[in-house]
Image (tube, helix red, strand yellow):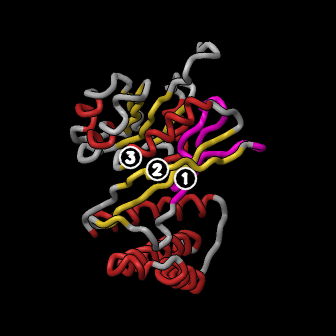
């Protein structure tokens, strides 16, 4: 238990599966200044565990996959610190973001959750438009205050009533897929999970609605969100977004008409 003069402690938490390619680079950005690193694996078959154990002995496994939201809830149960910072294995904490997080611990405010600005790459290039940036996401909070929701994919932190969301300085760099087809496989997986969840909740759609949503996603990414300023990468991203949205809604349509 901390005394009033103690600096609050911080846990970094990740949920992972087959992240040997990225994990060390991620953990290198936090290993020297956080109090504990917690990793919950969902069944890696590569060197993920070996790499993880170089940084922490708090490595756990849950192969009964409940969805992203509930897997994060399970991982949070292992946290023993005052604050939790969530990372994905393909993310890196920049020096400016590190300083901002340390400032949060120093001020130690209550009734606050903190969002960070994620700057992502696409096929080797940082994307600063296209609806990808700014990308503010809540990743830092007191674990006794809240947790992630139950959503299967694209889960988010539940912000308690009367809590403020404070944006902190510094980018969280996010290194997405370099390979187009690998990225498409991941998007297809997310689309399937989305369709399954929406179908279980009784959501309905139509082919015309699927086409409309897909076309608007292209317009939004490329024109409204200035994807054209990202050059050829912006056009590719807009096309990928359109395909992803089409897959989601057509998948849902086919499920409801079985």
Q: Secondary structure at mark 1?
A: strand
The residue at which mark 1 appears reads as 137
Can you tell which quarter of the image residue 224 is in? Answer: bottom right
Structural crowding at the residue carrying mark 2, measured as other residues with C-alpha within 10 Å and reported as few (<14), some (14–19) or many (≥20):
some
The residue wearing badge 3 is 94
Magenta part of the protein: which range? 135-162
Which residue is label 2 attached to? Answer: 170
- Please provide percent x and percent y for residue 48: 26, 38
Q: CA distance from mark 3 to mark 2?
A: 7 Å
Q: Earlier in the sequence, mark 3 or mark 1?
A: 3
Question: Could you tell me what secondary structure mostly forms the magenta stretch?
Answer: loop
Q: Earlier in the sequence, mark 3 or mark 2?
A: 3
**Residue that lies at the very extreme toward the right in this rendered image:** 162
Badges 3 and 2: C-beta atoms under 8 Å apart?
yes
Image coordinates of residue 141 in percent, x first then y, are 59, 37
Q: Please tell me whether residue 137 belongs to the stretch shown in magenta.
A: yes
Judge whether 210 appears above or below 153 on screen. Answer: below
Q: Residue 117 or 62: which is nearer the viewer?
A: 117
Say if mark 3 contacts mark 1, CB within 8 Å. Answer: no
The secondary structure type at the circle numbered 2 is strand
Which of the numbered marks, if any, corresponds to residue 238?
none
- Please, is residue 214 above or below residue 180 in the view? below
Residue lying at 33% horizontally and 56% vertically, measured from the top left = 175
Question: Relative to the observer, which residue lies in front, 106 or 165?
Answer: 106
């Amino acid at each position: 238990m901390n005394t009033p003069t103690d600096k609050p402690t911080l846990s970094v938490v990740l949920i992972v599966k087959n992240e040997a390619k990225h994990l060390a680079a991620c953990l290198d950005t936090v290993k020297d200044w956080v109090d504990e690193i917690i990793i919950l694996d969902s069944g890696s078959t590569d060197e993920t565990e070996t790499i993880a154990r170089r940084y922490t002995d708090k490595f756990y496994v849950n192969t009964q996959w409940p969805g992203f939201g509930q897997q994060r809830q399970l991982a949070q149960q292992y946290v023993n610190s005052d604050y939790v910072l969530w990372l994905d294995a393909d993310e890196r904490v920049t020096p400016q973001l590190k300083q901002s997080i340390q400032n949060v611990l120093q001020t130690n405010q209550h009734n606050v959750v903190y969002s960070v600005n994620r700057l992502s790459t696409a096929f080797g290039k940082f994307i600063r438009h296209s609806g990808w940036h700014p990308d503010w996401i809540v990743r830092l909070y007191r674990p006794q205050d809240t947790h992630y929701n139950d959503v299967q994919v694209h889960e988010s932190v539940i912000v308690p009533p009367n809590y403020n969301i404070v944006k902190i300085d510094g980018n969280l760099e996010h290194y997405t897929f370099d390979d187009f087809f690998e990225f498409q496989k991941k998007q297809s997986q997310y689309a399937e999970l989305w369709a399954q969840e929406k179908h279980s909740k009784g959501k309905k759609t139509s082919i015309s609605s699927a086409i409309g949503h897909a076309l608007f996603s292209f317009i939004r990414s490329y024109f409204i969100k200035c994807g054209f300023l990202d050059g050829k990468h912006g056009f590719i991203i807009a096309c990928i977004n359109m395909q992803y949205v089409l897959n989601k809604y057509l998948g849902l349509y086919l499920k409801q008409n079985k």
